[in-house]
Amino acid sequence: DRVIFKGHLPISRAAEFERFVDYTLKIRRADFLKTVGPKWSERLVEHSKQFARKDGRPWEYYAGDIDKDAWAKEQLARSPVVAGLVGVLCVMEACRTFKLAPGQDRPGFVARQVPQRVLYYYFVDKELGLMHVRLQTWAPFTCQVYANGHDYVARHLQKKGSAFEQVDNAFVQLADPAAAQRCADRFAKLPWPKILERYARRVNPLLHAELQGLSHYWVIDQAEYATDVRFTSQHALAGLFQRLLAFALLTFSPKKIFCYLGRKWHERFDGEVQTHYKSVREPGACIKHFMKRNWLKMYDKLALLLRVETVINQPGEFKVLRDCQHRDGTTSLGWFAMCKGVGTMHHYQSHPLACNHRYL
């Protein structure tokens, strides 16, 4: 389902940024915050305006809250795009950046959450469908890319001429479910570093000049893997779903939740395991089982599908069979914590799928 990638430049830590300012830019640290930083920020905003103007697409600024995805879909409905830019949103958000603080010898950079202009570029990609690229306009210029597996599958089914009906991010009809599953399985095997870096360089002109030579380290910030069970009618699902909700609420203990998420129960587990029930969703209800910042949830999607979904925010809570490189340079094969790097994307596919199957 939804995947959020984050790209970190090698100036993302305070010490790294200090070295960049001191030895690469060769300017005073205070001068960066007073002069260079605002100039670079303005350049990024001006680039986004020119980008939108060149493609004849909207550019809008909002200081308050706005449903950004709804805005993008509204622009797409007004003026459809086959491939390319949908529009650019500039909003104020609190993001991690650097401020000067007193130090032992001289003021040094420390990480702080500071309100700043953030750019949201919405694209229709010929392979991935509707996606967005989020760029901070202040150092360390963190880049975020959002993609959706359902849109990827829909684009490929269209190319193959396989009939389907998609509502929101769900398939309510599939002429060839096996072909759709094969497309979905290829999503994790795409050349993600190349795709993500290409989009980052389209929206950040600093990477071609002032930050030339720097490239992002891409990680998976959040990943959702959904398994849908299609019912023949709303009535067929409605009667069963209420019984499933009651069964889960009454019988799914923390030990069972551990089991579903592929973990062994241990009394010394340092964290919370909770179950939340929401009945204010449209059109139905949702039950969500938390283990720290990871969760497994079940809900009736569109009142036609029973969806079980595993969401991973803290991959280190899961163990996977992989090679581990140790500090002394040696490597060993064993069960180690799952990593966030995009090179481990296949683990974000196989592990949540197993969680969903255990739950079902």
Image (cartoon, rainbow, N blue to C red):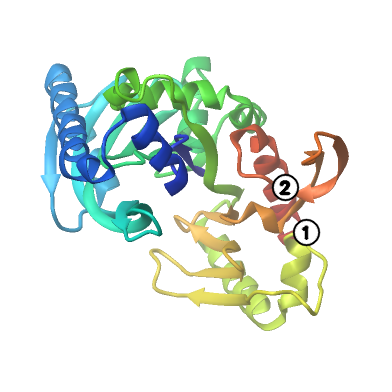
Check the image and name the residue furthest to the right. Answer: 333
Q: Amino acid at mark 2?
A: His
Instruction: Assign a secondary structure to mark 1.
Output: loop
* Mark sitting earlier along the chain (1/2): 1
| Residue 309: quarter of image | bottom right
User: What residue appears at the point 79 percent right and 41 percent down from the top-left corner?
Assistant: 326
Q: Position of residue 200 (x, y in %)?
A: 38, 27
Q: Residues within 10 Å of mark 2 (few under 14, many from 20)?
A: some
Which label was assigned to residue 351?
2
Check the image and name the residue furthest to the front. Answer: 105
User: What residue appears at the point 13 percent right and 54 percent down from the top-left corner?
Assistant: 63
Q: CA distance from mark 1 to mark 2?
A: 8 Å
Q: Residues within 10 Å of mark 1 (few under 14, many from 20)?
A: some
Q: Position of residue 151 (x, y in %)?
A: 45, 33
Q: How many marks?
A: 2
Please indicate whether residue 319 sits to the left or right of residue 133 in the image: right
Whether residue 261 is visible to the viewer of this picture, yes or no, is yes
The reply to whether the C-beta atoms of the residues labelled 1 and 2 are less than 8 Å apart is yes
User: Which residue is under mark 1?
Assistant: 262
Q: Amino acid at mark 1?
A: Gly
Instruction: Assign a secondary structure to mark 2.
Output: helix
Question: Is the residue 266 above or below the residue 231 in the image?
Answer: below
Please indicate whether residue 329 sits to the left or right of residue 278 in the image: right
User: What residue appears at the point 70 percent right and 41 percent down from the top-left corner?
Assistant: 347
Q: Position of residue 206 (x, y in %)?
A: 29, 25
Q: Position of residue 50 (x, y in %)?
A: 14, 22
| Residue 146: quarter of image | top left
User: What residue appears at the point 19 percent right and 48 percent down from the top-left corner?
Assistant: 91
Dividing the image into 4 quarters, which one contains the C terminus? Answer: bottom right
Q: Nearer the viewer, residue 69 or 109?
A: 109
Question: Is the residue 158 above or below the residue 7 in the image?
Answer: above
Q: Nearer the viewer, residue 152 or 232?
A: 152
